[in-house]
Amino acid sequence: MTEQPSQPVQSKRLLLYSILTIAILAAVSIGYFLFTFDLNNYRKNAEEELSSLLSLPVTLGEIGYKLHDTNLALHIDGL
């Protein structure tokens, strides 16, 4: 007959599984957000805001983001 794990072992295992599940869900959520988020939807707002701050006409090209080494970098064409 096999022995049941003691209560503290079961509690630690449940805590570990819970933390792993939350970490995986957070990583998947962040990945989904970055994959589906389109910065070009906010291009017009950025142009208007920059124009009012600089008191000059501003037009922006394609806006995106890239992973540069381990950092997230904003990439704007035709500033």
Image: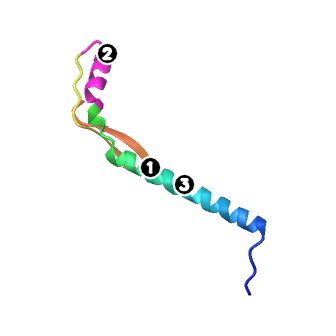
Magenta extent: 42-56
Give the spatial CA distance, label 1 vs label 3.
10 Å
Res 77 → quadrant: top left
Q: How many marks?
A: 3
Coordinates of residue 65 in the picture (x, y in percent): 34, 42
Would you place residue 78 above or below residue 3 in this image?
above
Mark number displayed over residue 29:
1
The mark that comes first in sequence, 3 or 2, is: 3
Task: Check whether the beta carbons of the residues at disc 3 and disc 2 lie within 8 A of each other.
Answer: no
Label 2: state its secondary structure: helix
Query: Residue shown at 33%/42% (left/top)?
Result: 37
Query: Residue shown at 34%/46% (left/top)?
Result: 66
Query: Does the segment drawn in magenta span residue 44?
Result: yes
- Toward the viewer: 50 or 79? 50
- Toward the viewer: 77 or 39? 39
Query: Residue shown at 58%/59% (left/top)?
Result: 20
Q: Residues within 10 Å of mark 2 (few under 14, many from 20)?
A: few
Q: Mark 3 is on which residue type?
A: Ala
Give the spatial CA distance, label 2 vs label 1.
36 Å
Query: Residue shown at 73%/84% (left/top)?
Result: 2
Label 1: state its secondary structure: helix
Mark number displayed over residue 54:
2
Question: Badge 3 is on which residue?
Answer: 23
